[in-house]
Amino acid sequence: MTARMRFGWLDVVVIGCVVALLAYVAYRVHGHLVYHWNWAEPLQFFFRRDEADGGWVPNLLIEGVIITLRVSLWGAVLGMAIGLLAGLGRISQVALFRMISRGYVELVRNVAPVPFLFIMFFFVGNQILKPLGLEGVQDAVSPATGGVLELMFGELNLLRNFAAATLALALYEGAYIAEIVRAGVLSIERGQWEAGDSLGLSRLHQLRHVILPQAVQRITPPLANQSIQLIKDSSLVSLLSIQEMTFMGQEIAHSTSRFFETWIIVAAMYFVVCFGLSRIYARLERRINKSRR
Amino acid sequence: MRASTDADANAFLQLDGVSKAFGDFHALVDVNFTIAEGEFICFLGPSGCGKTTLLRCIAGLETQSEGRIRMGGADISWLPTSERDFGIVFQSYALFPNLTVSDNVAYGLVNKRMAKPAIKARVAELLSLVDLSEHISKYPGQLSGGEQQRVALARALATSPGLLLLDEPLSALDAKVRAHLRREIRAIQDRLGVTTIMVTHDQEEAQTMADRIFVMNEGRIEQLGTPDEIYNAPATPFVADFIGVMNFFTATVAEGGGVVRGDLTLACETGGHGEGTELNCAVRPEDIRLIDRDGDDGANIIEATVDSIEFLGSFVRLYLALPALGAGELRADVRKEQAQHLDIAVGGTVRLRIPPATIRLYEAGPPR
Ligand SMILES: Nc1ncnc2c1ncn2[C@@H]1O[C@H](COP(=O)(O)OP(=O)(O)OP(=O)(O)O)[C@@H](O)[C@H]1O
Ligand SMILES: [Mg+2]
């Protein structure tokens, strides 16, 4: 393993190239671009003074993060459910289930995400959620319940929009999760199924008690990975007027004209959230592995 | 050899013309047999001869390409695995790693609509049967190979199946544990009276455990019989060669009986073979008697040179050169005391006798 620690001449060349490139960029920015950095203006969109009592309250950027996390959380929950069903459908003994799941997965994998999301958004919003009458929710529930719902789903008068966008995102991610689930179940040795068959148990029973518990252990790392992917993909719902981080970034960039600074700040926020999450996952994984030994 | 396709009234398990092909490869060829209730059967044969495939066909884990399988009088040829009445121990055990020992054993009982306390009692009973009571809440990964094997056995027995299938259950274990579990498995089988088929490629295992042995070779059953019959009256050169140790040499039927090869003439029962027919002669090393230099003058007395000596515990194996056999050697097993008494040394000559009754003759053609 010492070989990995030593520098070879190739490393020196690579590092030299990187340094030269950085120096060139710095030179261009400094000498030619003549860009006047102004961080103060976009940074004030983290917190603002409340006009009524003068205290600090979250501004657009913080609100955006919260909505991004909200969309991602529900997107992940729904996406896992959809992915589980579609993944199991792909290996079902029923040809119809296999066909439907296959069609769904191939559709998502071969269509660009933006048109897919738009189609799903309008289809789900108009055909499925409208008849459910989500519009009147805020009037139908008590203020306390309304508060809880608001914490979970955001402003209730936008609930239909939120639900449609989240479901569209979940449908997009679900296809990738389905492939992970499928691979996980297929990775379980055939002998496990055969042992269950020999004991006279139904396929569903075996799946629940033997196959899935083992598969879940194996697919947890790729699923964690996919959840980080999902947070990044959630920026797509800004196109569906969900006011999450990217949407807010657009607003701020336009209103302040500080494009460079605003987008660097938004990018950094995505990085913090995603990198933080991946560190948490890594730690959890280590702990689980330790306890399993 | 083809058995009738009618149901045999006494048979518990009956296979009629069962064949299995994987593409062009014939893993099983026209397998016929019947097994009575309560029998302990061993499928014995070299690696790749189709033992596991045959077991899997009986279990329904593989579908036979041809033929029919009956169990308890009913045709189960097309019954799915989960509806067949058997318990199985796989070569790799295939325990459920995410379930505890007791949950593994209880697993088959869950859908029998048994009450929880009844399941618990049954699991405790089974685990004490296989002597594992103290490991009840461990996971399979925390058990030794022998313990895992016993969990697999308890799991297979949990639903009180009519048929127990064991696929080389002992092959992964060390010699001592293996010998112990052999006796244990046979004792459990005797106590429960469950019809059992065990796959093995270890002839000693088959000899010590089975009521009847089915010797398999290249997808066929070469011979079925008691351990005694298989050893003392091997039906084919393959069985003769595979079971125990056997000397083989070719010779032709001599004028007036016996066989001849070069200057070697041996008296033996030639059956219906006509004079001049070339035959395969087989003699077991332990049937060859060494005699004193000036000892009795019976039939089939030969002089041979000792090529090498192998010490095998309580006996020694001599590799003997005979002019008539050319490059072929004759192996003879002698008790240690006798070898000392006769003062046998490499390069010396010995006098030996092959009792005519111990010479077995097979149609010519090399043993497969
Ligand atoms: N699914 C399959 N597809 C193709 N060939 C197979 C399949 N299963 C088994 N075979 C072949 O059939 C033959 C018999 O296999 P089988 O597993 O029954 O052997 P075995 O007697 O149990 O050997 P061993 O003692 O090594 O376990 C082998 O040559 C094997 O390669
Ligand atoms: Mg095998």
Image (spheres, rainbow, N blue to C red):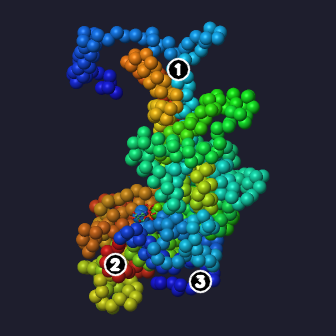
Q: Residue at x 68, y 53 (%)?
A: B106
Q: Residue B211: where, in percent of width, then height?
A: 58, 71
Q: Position of residue B41 (x, y in %)?
A: 56, 69
| Residue at image location 42% in from the left, 62% down from the top | B47
Q: Nearer the viewer, residue A140 or B163?
A: A140
Category of crowding for the residue at label 1, using alpha-carbon neighbours closer than 10 angstroms: few (below 14), some (14–19), many (at least 20): many
Residues behind callouts 3 and 1 on a single chain: no
Residue A121 shows in this picture: yes
* Left or right of residue B130, residue A17 in this image: left
Under mark 1, the amino acid is Leu
Residue B340 drawn at (x, y percent): 41, 59
Horizontal side, residue A87 vs residue A267: left or right: right
Where is B187 relative to A128, above or below?
A: below
Q: Is residue B121 left or right of residue B64?
A: right
Residue B20: quarter of image: bottom left
Q: Is residue B49 above or below residue A168?
A: below
Mark 1 lies on a secondary structure that is: helix
Badge 3: chain ID: B
Could you classify mark 3 by the number of other residues whose Cα lies within 10 Å: few (under 14), some (14-19), or many (20 or more)?
many
Q: Is residue A239 above or below residue B196?
A: above
Give the residue displayed 61% in from the left and 50% down from the top.
A208
Q: Is residue A186 visible?
A: no
Residue for badge 3: B7
Q: At 59% from the left edge and 33% from the top edge, which residue is drawn?
A: A158
Select label 3 or label 2 by which is in front.
3
Name above or below for residue A200 compared with residue A129: below
* Quadrant holding the N terminus of chain A: top left
**Residue under numbered circle 1:** A60
Q: Check whether the beta carbons of the residues at disc 3 and disc 1 lie within 8 A of each other.
A: no
Task: Find residue B280 and name its label.
Answer: 2
